[in-house]
Amino acid sequence: MYKNDRHPAEQLAETMTRIYQNGLTSTSGGNLSVMDEDGSMWITPGSIDKGTLTPEDIVRVLPDGTIEGRHKPSIEYKFHRKIYQVRPHIRAIVHAHPSALVGYSLVQRLPEVSLFPAAAEGIGKILPIGYAVPGSDDLVDCVTQAYAAGADAAIMANHGAITASSISLADAYNRFESLVRLAQIECWARTFGQVSCLTDEQKGRFAEVLSDHTANQQDCYGEQRGSEYCAVKTSSEETKGKTQLPMDLPERRELLYWTKRAAAQRLIAGNLFSFSRRTGEDSFLINPRGMGAFEMELTDLVHLQDRQTTQIQPAHTGMLQPQDRQTISCKAQMEETQDGQAQMEETQDGQAQAMQFTPRQVPEALWSIHQRIYRDHPEISAILLNYPEAMMGLACSDAELEPRSMPEIYMMLRTLPHLSLQAFLEDPDSLSRVLGKATPVTYVQNGFVISTADRLQTAFDRMEVAESAAQATAAARLFGEVAPLPEEEVRKIEEVFHLK
């Protein structure tokens, strides 16, 4: 499901630019690499502005150690090579210095994985790496020891962090962002007050209900990670500038836009989100499992119609807009093979056919959450299930947010109820019962935040307001207790803005 058809140099330049723009490293810090099929390692250069890298700046290290390129490779290229040697299934490595993870490295401890299981499942095994001088053989030895012991991610003492992936650079980046988000959430939770962690029993039960976020992954030794999952999308065959368009194209554009905007606003990290938009009485679009927002395209979005099958019917032939990025064609049919994999079969006459999908395209539990809410609330047409850092910090602490602290917060959130983890685990349908016109946003303890509305823009706005309110509340607690609006002022707001 990852788009690996682009040259490694292009992938590395684009990903490093994204890391820098998202504030995860400095101008000179961090390094990324990709292992090519011919055994060559492509790696970012050293001492070059990480915010302006181009494919021409990327360095190639041949299997015999010969270095090709107009720059020297990163000073830490040796530990990259060593990871690939001890873990031959690994295809990409990300190393950077985000402040939240550097904070953990300075006290030489790991983020609390029992705080936020959804992120921990996607990150994998996190191990510590002892301190050594950057670029030294001692550092190579320290890193090698951790990855030989099976690390998927590591915190380097007084330095930074590393993630690796057996799938792609995109997956390594998503894993890195998930690690950062895990650290950020614990920092916010400690700011709010007493941190709430899950027991092993709760983590196991949580995994059963939600399923994990990993997508048909294998770890770096080839063992299966998570449940089987098949990413499905339409083909991209173009004919004379025209293409067969699916009926849900406008809805796809809208959902993709708000998904990418959420990533740009740092509301989502990596592939830790589940966004959907209703398309009919019993159908909706939802993002695919395991894919980050930055790499997502129109045809990656999944259209679910009921619990048995999904269909995308062609609507008409027309021109795609430039923002659609790639063409869409329905001249194929998806069929599932005996081993559970999907394959494309073109029809003999080349005519457009309905594309049959299976429910395994998205995590069963997350899909079920969306389905329950749409089933119970006809007025809801957009659902954003998400893990914003401050709101999740609140959800992982003993603190609560007071929506009546500010007119905008009350107007957008009304009340902000939440479910205990135990209540959700015992009855997942209870989440749908909590939601309503006066309760459009809620959260599950140590679980997730969910925002609903009759359209995506409003659901997005509510998620932004909730996150901003959580950050403001954390800041306010440094100075004293939050003072809510008097009851008579709340009533005035309800009357003026017709909130009754």
Image (cartoon, rainbow, N blue to C red):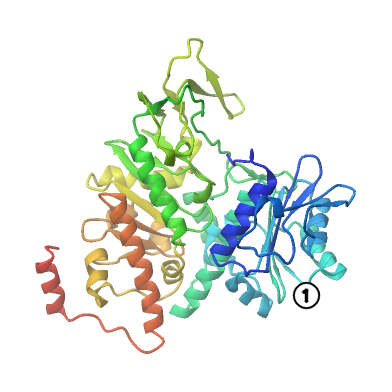
Question: Mark 1 packing: few (<14 Cα in 10 Å), some, or many (20+)?
Answer: some
**As displayed, is residue 230 above or below residue 377?**
above
Q: Is residue 452 visible?
A: no
Residue 474, by quadrant, is: bottom left
Residue 30 placed where, x, y %?
68, 65
Drawn side of residue 92 relative to residue 369, left or right: right
Count of labels in the image: 1
Q: Nearer the viewer, residue 131 or 77?
A: 77
Q: Residue at x 30, y 65 (%)?
A: 417
Drawn side of residue 302 relative to residue 497, left or right: right
- Image quarter in which the N terminus is found: top right
Q: Nearer the viewer, residue 94 or 421?
A: 94
Residue occupying the far top of the picture: 349
Drawn side of residue 131 relative to residue 184, left or right: right
Amino acid under label 1?
A: Tyr
**As displayed, is residue 140 above or below residue 89?**
below
Residue occupying the far front of the picture: 70
Q: Is residue 92 visible?
A: yes
- Image quarter in which the C terminus is found: bottom left
Q: Residue at x 52, y 75 (%)?
A: 187
Residue occupying the far bottom of the picture: 479
**As displayed, is residue 12 above or below residue 445?**
above
SS at mark 1 in the image: loop
Drawn side of residue 150 relative to residue 300, left or right: right
Q: Residue at x 31, y 60 (%)?
A: 461
Residue 446 placed where, x, y %?
46, 64
Residue 407 placed where, x, y %?
22, 73
- Name the residue that disc number 1 marks: 131
Residue 20, by quadrant, is: bottom right
Residue 484 placed where, x, y %?
24, 80
